[in-house]
Image: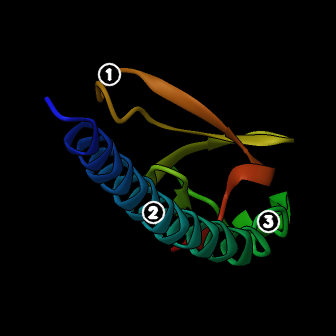
Amino acid sequence: MKRDTVSAYRARGKKTHDEIDAELARQKAESDARIEAARVKERAGRKTEGTITRDSFDGFTMGSHWIRDQFGWRRVIKVNSRSVTVKSLINNAWTDTVRFEKIREVMR
């Protein structure tokens, strides 16, 4: 190969790598912006967390209340002093405990 052919080949290779790096940087910036927007949205949703207390379950009878936590709506089985017992998402024979701080909404 001639000398200028080698340098032209290297120049084209460098240009291609620079274009790829620029595109990757652009895609990363877009991804970071989407992630940050999702974080802001999640933080806005968290503002309602922690406002639920035992008093939110006044007049409770088994199965009459539903809670929404990070996994969705779940039927309340028992109200404890700091948490509620709900049906498990995996197996209806099992139960899970959800602390009041993690509850987003309560519905009758």
Q: Position of residue 34 (x, y in %)?
A: 51, 71
Locate the N terminus by quadrant.
top left
Q: How is the image coloured?
A: rainbow
- The residue that disc 2 covers is 22
Residue 99 pos. (x, y %): 75, 42
The residue under label 3 is 52
Task: Decide if residue 68 is on the left or right side of residue 92.
Answer: right
Q: Is residue 50 visible?
A: yes
Question: For the residues carrying marks 2 and 1, which lies nearer the camera in this image?
Answer: 2
Type of the residue with mark 3: Ile
Under tag 2, what secondary structure? helix
Q: In the image, what residue occupies the spot 48% across and 26% down?
A: 95
Point 71% across, 78% down: residue? 44
Marking on residue 93: 1
Given the image, on which type of amino acid does mark 1 rest? Ala
Q: Secondary structure at mark 1?
A: loop
Seen in the picture, residue 15 relative to 5 is either above or below; the reply is: below
Q: Classify 59 as above or below 8.
A: below
Image coordinates of residue 36 in percent, x first then y, are: 64, 69
Residue sticking out furthest to the left: 1
| Residue in front for this viewpoint, 70 or 96 | 70
The tally of labels here is: 3
